[in-house]
Each structure stands twice: as structure tokens, then as C-alpha cells.
């Protein structure tokens, strides 16, 4: 009887260790691997983006001019989702 209990504890410990190891390696997402998205031709580091920081649990947003258009991007941490919106001919983007 004592051997069964010990075997169960060992099996449980191995299972928990495997789950923790899997969880630690599965957490590496887009935030920890920047620029692993579509190919890009360059960077626009000229003007800073206007960042809108929301409370925890809500997506943050950023906007920036790209020529005459204003581009809004939603970002939510390491989650695989986000959104993009474009305002054509935004008057704030004329120089």
C-alpha cells in the first residue's frame, strides 16, 4: 500500500514539472520576439506615436501619421490579437 502512494506522488510531481516546463516555454509570444511579423521595408522613427494607455484588461492604442493618413493600432500585451484603423486625409497629418 505504501508503494502505491509513493508512486502516485512521484507521478504527480513528474506531471506538475512537465506542465510547468511546457508553460514556461509556451509563454514566449510576440512581445518577447519583436518584428516576427510581416516583412517590412524600413522603420519610421521620425515622429513619436501618440499612445493611449488604457487600464489593465483593455487594449492600449497608438496613432501616428503616415503621409496624409492617420494610422491607429491596438495592442494588448502578448495576446495574438490587435486591430488597425486608418483615417484618410486626417487634417492633423498635413505639414
Image (cartoon, rainbow, N blue to C red):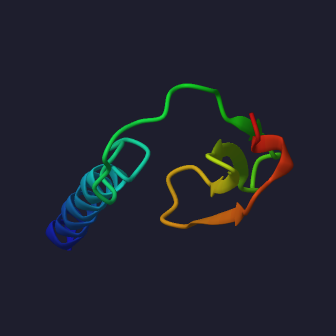
Q: Quadrant of the N terminus?
A: bottom left
Q: Residue furthest front?
A: 95
At x 68% / y 65%, what residue is drawn?
85
Q: Write down the quadrant of residue 34 in the picture.
A: top left
Compared to residue 32, the image places residue 45 above or below, namely above
At x 30% / y 61%, what residue is drawn?
19
Instruction: Report x, y in % for residue 76.
Output: 62, 54
Instruction: Work out whether residue 75 or residue 64 is closer to the camera in this orientation and state it.
Output: 64
Q: Write down the quadrant of residue 12 in the picture.
A: bottom left
Instruction: Work out whether residue 57 or residue 75 is closer to the camera in this orientation and state it.
Output: 75
Q: Quadrant of the C terminus?
A: top right
Task: Give the side of residue 45 with respect to residue 74, left or right.
Answer: left
At x 55% / y 25%, what residue is drawn?
46
Instruction: Report x, y in % for residue 54.
Output: 81, 46
Task: Give the side of residue 46 with respect to residue 7, left or right.
Answer: right
Q: Write down the quadrant of residue 51 in the picture.
A: top right
Instruction: Report x, y in % for residue 18.
Output: 22, 59
Instruction: Report x, y in % for residue 10.
Output: 19, 60
Compared to residue 82, the image places residue 78 above or below, namely above
Instruction: Work out whether residue 92 or residue 61 is closer to the camera in this orientation and state it.
Output: 92
At x 82% / y 46%, what residue is drawn?
55
Instruction: Work out whether residue 23 or residue 76 is closer to the camera in this orientation and state it.
Output: 76
Amino acid at each position: 500500500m505504501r508503494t502505491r502512494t509513493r508512486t502516485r506522488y512521484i507521478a504527480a510531481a513528474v506531471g506538475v514539472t512537465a506542465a510547468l516546463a511546457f508553460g514556461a516555454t509556451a509563454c514566449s509570444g510576440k512581445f518577447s520576439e519583436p518584428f516576427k511579423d510581416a516583412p517590412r521595408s524600413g522603420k519610421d522613427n521620425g515622429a513619436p506615436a501618440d499612445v493611449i494607455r488604457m487600464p489593465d484588461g483593455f487594449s492600449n492604442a497608438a496613432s501616428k501619421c503616415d503621409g496624409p493618413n492617420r494610422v491607429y493600432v491596438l495592442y494588448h500585451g502578448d495576446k495574438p490579437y490587435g486591430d488597425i484603423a486608418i483615417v484618410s486625409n486626417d487634417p492633423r497629418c498635413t505639414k
